[in-house]
Structures are given as structure tokens and as C-alpha cells.
Image (spheres, rainbow, N blue to C red):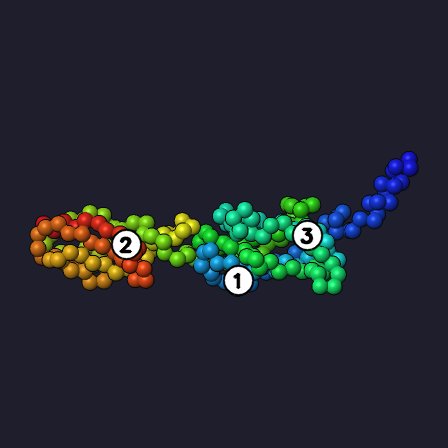
Amino acid sequence: FADAIIGVLLVGLLPTSAVATTGLSFTVTISGAGMTAGGTALPVTVSALMDGEAYPAYIGTVTFTSSDPLATNLNGGLPVDYTFTVGDGNDNGAHVFDAPGVKFETAGDQFVDVADTLDPTNLSESTHVTVTHGALASFASIAPPDATIAAGASDAYTVMGLDTYGNTWDATSTTDFSVGAGATCTDNSCTSTTVGGYTVTATDHVNPLVHVSTGLTVT
């Protein structure tokens, strides 16, 4: 009986936010929300609410999940679990995560969810971000591959860019096309009036080390 009384007293001494999460939610704001390139670190502000009102006494622990499967707290894409603090110079219900914050990698509409670790299914969704591809790392493909055209005809080429996160996009407009002697390329269209075999090379405007080639046969 004495142990039961002590247990009740101890529970009564625990901070409310560490015992109950009923009515708890968060506002989650990603700075610069709108459009950003994959791999960009974005600060995120998490503010605790209790029944819709600011909750400066919150001292629970928050955990992050993401719509982007490549953004995790293991690779620096999400903040690790964090326990809020109260008092002068502390969180008092709001904390900015900016080292590095949130870092999406997959192109598309992305967001994060935040929850208290005591109730991980009660998620609060952040503002959304449109993620575009990151910097060009290589070309995924050139099309058409190994084409054959009649002398005097032409073929229009397209290239797909690839970033370090696996995103692909049409990179034709930012690519220079060239072909060997006896043939010419105008923009992405290559032609020759001379029968023979040629090599069409696509080279990135910015980084000439990024290129891809394919054969062209003129008959």
C-alpha cells in the first residue's frame, strides 16, 4: 500500500508533457518552403501546441519522419530525436533545427512529420517543399542510340541528366552536341551528306568532363 502511494506521488511530480500527449500538436515550418534543389539543407522550426495554443512548458522529445525515403536521420537528411528545454535561453516550446535541418534528395513534393516519441502516430505535418533535381553528375542516357539516317537527313538527340541522388530529367537544353568531321550539329540536331560512321557527343554546358556519346551511321 505504501509503495502504491509513493508511485502515485512520483507520477504527480512528473512534468505533464512527459506523461500525457492528449491535445499536443506541433507547427512545423520549413524555411524557404517553395522550391529547392535536392540536397539543399533547410532550417525547420518546430513549435509545440497544447489544445491549439502555444505550449512553452513542453519538455517532451520529438522525432522526425519524412515523405522522402532518402531523407533520414542516419544520413543527415533529418534531425535526430530532440528533447525540448525550458527556462531562460532555452526552447520554451519552440526550436529551430538548422544543423543541417532538413535535406530532401528525391525530386517532387516533400514534407516532414513531427511527433512526440510517447505518441509517434500523432503526426504533425510540415509545410511542403517542391524538390527539383540536384547538380548534374552524369548523363543517364542519350537517344536515339546508334542511329542510322540517309545522307542529307538529320536526327534530333535528347539526353537525360542524372544527379547524385538518382533523379533524372531532360537535360537537352543545357547540353552541347558535336559530331566528327564531315558532319554537323545545329543545337541537338545532327546531319551529314557524307556516307560513313560518326560519333555524336553530348557535353554539359558547365562541366565539359560530363559527356556521353553514341554512334551515327549515314547511308
Q: Is residue 184 left or right of residue 28?
A: left
Which residue, as the protein is rendered here, is positioned at the far right? 2
Q: Is residue 206 left or right of residue 92?
A: left
Q: Residue at x 36, y 54 (%)?
A: 137
Contact check, label 1 and label 3, Cβ < 8 Å: no
As shown in the figure, which amino acid type bears the numbered disc 2? His
On-image quarter of the N terminus: top right
> x and y percent of residue 22 in the render?
73, 50
> Which of labels 1 and 3 is toward the front?
3
Would you name the residue on which mark 3 appears? Answer: 83
Which residue, as the protein is rendered here, is positioned at the far top? 1
Nearest to N terminus: mark 3 or mark 2: 3
Which residue, as the protein is rendered here, is positioned at the far left? 194
> x and y percent of residue 10 in the render?
84, 45
Crowd class of label 3 (few under 14; some 14 to 19; many from 20; radius 10 Å): some
Q: How many marks?
A: 3
As shown in the figure, which amino acid type bears the numbered disc 1? Ala
> x and y percent of residue 82 in the render?
65, 52
Q: Quadrant of residue 58?
A: bottom right
Would you name the residue on which mark 1 appears? Answer: 33
Would you name the residue on which mark 2 appears? Answer: 211
As shown in the figure, which amino acid type bears the numbered disc 3? Thr
Gap in Å between the C-alphas at discs 1 and 3? Answer: 25 Å
Q: Residue at x 88, y 37 (%)?
A: 3
Element assignment for label 2: strand
